[in-house]
Image: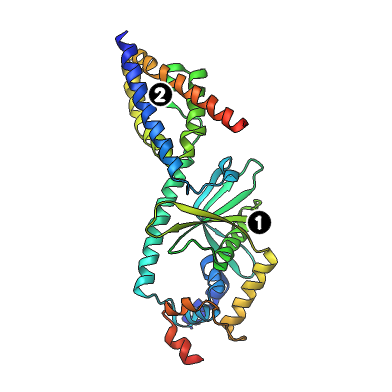
Amino acid sequence: MRDELLGAILCGLVAWLVWRALQRRKIRTSDWMRHELRSSRLAYAEQLFRSTGPVAVSAKVDRAYRDQAGVLTLVELKTRNADKVYLSDVIELSAQRFALGSQTGEVVNTRGYVVVQIAGLRGSSVHRVDLLTTGELQALIARRQTLLEGAVKPQQTCRPGLCRNCAFLRPCRDEE
Amino acid sequence: MKAAAKRRRRSASVSASELAQMGVCERLVVFEHRYGKRRLPEQRAAIERGRREHERFYREGRIASAPLGRCFIATIVFGEGPETQTLRAFRDQVLRQAPTGRRLVATYYRVAPGVCRMLQRQLWAHMVLRITLRPIIWLASRWLCATEARRAR
């Protein structure tokens, strides 16, 4: 009888702890994991991949989830002051997709996720993005090569806010 | 000579973050190639903050993906019976879905091997644990039923 009473008290304590945990989860609506990823398993975390080819692409994957069909989906974490996704995120995930697919031969989803952790706030939000095709990525690599060789004139960003926080502001102005 | 060779090697490979700079500013890509990376103090602080968040994100990921199928204490006490299955299902379907739950699971996996070693020596403790766990298993099974009913709706 005493054992059962002790069991019931312990059980009540555990139930209260679990209930509190789940209540907290309800408050934290920003829990980023999307429904479509819930059934997937984490396949790679913070792992470096490298593609083959004339210009090798190396990429560190934040997380890659494998679904039941064996398709990998990439997730990239960004710490920002604003809840926004930029073209650079799409390019980075596309490069990861290319490197991962090339090295492992596995199928990687054409859609990825950017988890934005807003500075000073608890929780994060998630954005689904369509990645670049391999052709588009190769074109971007080729464009970068021509820029570095000086064959074409580099374009300035269309986001003036970036220039204010750029360490190359002065040489950039001097070249104009 | 060495610098030229190094530059050739570098130009034959590109990292994802270098490529991502193309989406920020082409001039920045060229300047960084020409002069190396330069960071303002606030950019360095942001990079450091990002590094810390990445470490946390990595740890959280590893906890969430701890191998399925281990439920040490329940397996010792009940064997591979329905009680163990219920606790496993509760862990995977309820606890693993919330950050606090994942931390609880991680804590359990840290503590459980020690408890198991104790259980192997103290057989009387099996009975105590069986009594303690039964109401928990009952609650877990009710919880799982309610979750499934909610999903079905």
Instruction: Kindly give the residue lying farthest to the right in the view shown.
Output: A135
What subunit carries mark 2?
A: B
Q: Is residue B70 above or below residue A175?
A: above
Q: Residues within 10 Å of mark 2 (few under 14, many from 20)?
A: many
* Residue B153 in view: yes
Q: Which residue is mark 1?
A: A110
Is residue B63 visible in the rendered structure shown here?
A: no
| Mark 2 secondary-structure assignment | helix
In front of the other: A137 or B117? A137
Q: Amino acid at mark 1?
A: Thr
Q: Measuring 37% from the left and 22% from the top, which residue is drawn there? A: A11
Give the mark toward the camera: 1 or 2. Answer: 1
Q: In which quadrant of the rendered image does the C terminus of chain B lie?
A: top right
Residue at x 40%, y 65% (from the top left corner): B47
Between B108 and B150, the residue placed more toward the observer is B150
> Quarter-wise, where is residue A170 in the image?
bottom left
Residue identified by numbered label 2: B73
Q: Name which quarter of the figure residue A2 lies in.
A: top left
